[in-house]
Image: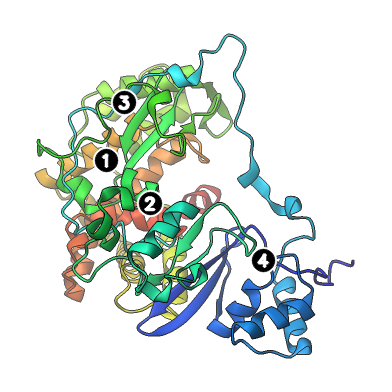
Amino acid sequence: MSPSTPPARPRLAAHVLARRHLVGEEERVILHDVRTGQLLQLGPREWVLLSAADGTRDVEGIVIAAAREGAHARVPAAQAFFAELHAAGLLGADDPGEDAGPWRAATPGLDPGERDPRERPLEVLPDFSLHCDGRGSCCRIYASILFDPEEAARARALRPDVLSGGARHERAFTPERGTWPCAASVVAMRDGRCAYLEGEGRCSLHARGGPEAKPLGCRTFPTSFIDDGESVRVSVAVECACVLASVGRPGGAPLLDPRLVTRGDLDERIDVARLPDCAQVAPGATASRAEVVAWSRRLAAAAPPPDVAAGLFSLAAALEAEGLAGGAIARFERPDPLDPASLAPWLAALHGRAARRAREDAAWRSERDLARRATRWIADATLALAEPDLLAALLLSPVRARVGDRERFTLRAALHGHRLIGALPLSLALRDRAVRLVVARALPAVIAGEGADDPACAEPIALVEATLRGHGLDAYAAEAAMAG
């Protein structure tokens, strides 16, 4: 088969996510290529045709299967449709294993002499409990809410009326990846909200069947787990207004059942990330996992400066100059003022990515969709901060006490959960976090100018964090680093 010829038995590639959205009463299916960021919008008829392409049927068989579902197409038109998808790089290879990619990665084995990970203690973020009032954004800002087969069947049994999915799984769910059957499904979204979310912001599955009726990811959110070789750090993702509204408020729900003591006590389905054996500290400089863990603990114990964003930027420069040793943490505690010229390329890169996504969203997302509005607000805020005088004025303004409390907690949660260690070198990740805090400081003026009154707007940091991670805007940091 030549590269220009579609597979004889086509199917959507594993790196393509198909997500069903209802905008008002209009159904749209969006194909998202996670490798390129490309989006393609399909109508219901085209999706029925594509969903029949599971890698087991030729085009004639796909047309017959789609016709049974009421989506009629002629074979030549179907062939042209699949040729177009193939040309866009959206179809998988004949062998599903050829493009399964990192989603089939094996769990790393034990190093010689390493303690059994199941025996590692669970180290929970101290002095925090969650007060969830149902007014946050977690059920209405992310593109994917995952259900395993049992969870999806239970949801359809409890709420058979939702999207008429009681008897037909495919009416309420799409595969997590591609079009062939896989281990998880994704629920459809209505105006950017989980289809099982009731009008007043409460989960209808929880209301009908109790908390155990929700999928595991919803029950554990916003808790995060990462094994750092010494313990499993249990922290919190600062991506929902409820998280920051809980800061300093005792008496909420614990992040983890206190009866759970070691990793082996956790539900085996919980995703426990693994801190890499070697991490990039700065471009061209690395450190061992043990060194990074020790440094992280020292930073968490340090006295945070009045301006956390300035502290993070100064710390980044110190790491690049001195590494983890030396006086880097002292630079965090007593930072230089933020330099508008240093921030400008980062803000420009974030604006470029947010503005592109805002234009794409406007073509298909509802105006009521929180993801669409949040992306537009970030684009507007970063555009405003491109004005040097406005950025300088913002950086010279004292950080209000409430904002400072939120920023310090965000850093504390990130350090405890090792959320600064990832694809970016640590020094760049620190600058990225500083930029997010600056953008969050500018966001309230943008939101107020639009007259928005969404409860999620009460905590701009959480809105920025959720939007950047949930909708790919966080890739701006790599672009900014390359531009710099």
Secondary structure at badge 2 equals loop
First of labels 4, 1 by sequence position? 4
Residue at left 41%, top 21%?
293
Q: Given the image, on which type of amino acid does mark 2 rest?
A: Pro
Q: Is residue 253 visible?
A: yes
- The answer to whether residue 375 is left or right of residue 80 is left
Q: Which mark is residue 215?
A: 2
Q: Given the image, on which type of amino acid does mark 1 rest?
A: Thr
Residue at left 64%, top 57%?
14
Report the number of discs: 4
Disc 4 vs disc 2: which is toward the camera? 2
Q: CA distance from mark 1 to mark 2?
A: 26 Å
Q: Answer yes or no: do the residues labelled 4 and 1 have beta carbons within 8 Å?
A: no
Disc 3 vs disc 1: which is toward the camera? 3
- The answer to whether residue 351 is left or right of residue 169 is left
- The answer to whether residue 474 is left or right of residue 334 is right
Q: Given the image, on which type of amino acid does mark 4 rest?
A: Leu
Q: Which residue is more in the foreground, 258 or 110?
A: 258
Splitting the image into 4 quarters, where does residue 294 fall?
top left
First of labels 4, 3 by sequence position? 4
What residue did someone put label 3 on? 260
Density class for disc 4 (Cα within 10 Å; few <14, some 14-19, many ≥20) is many
Where, quadrant-wise, is the N terminus in this rendering? Answer: bottom right
Secondary structure at badge 4 equals loop
What residue did someone put label 1 on? 410
Q: Given the image, on which type of amino acid does mark 3 rest?
A: Leu
Q: Which residue is more in the foreground, 428 or 20?
A: 20
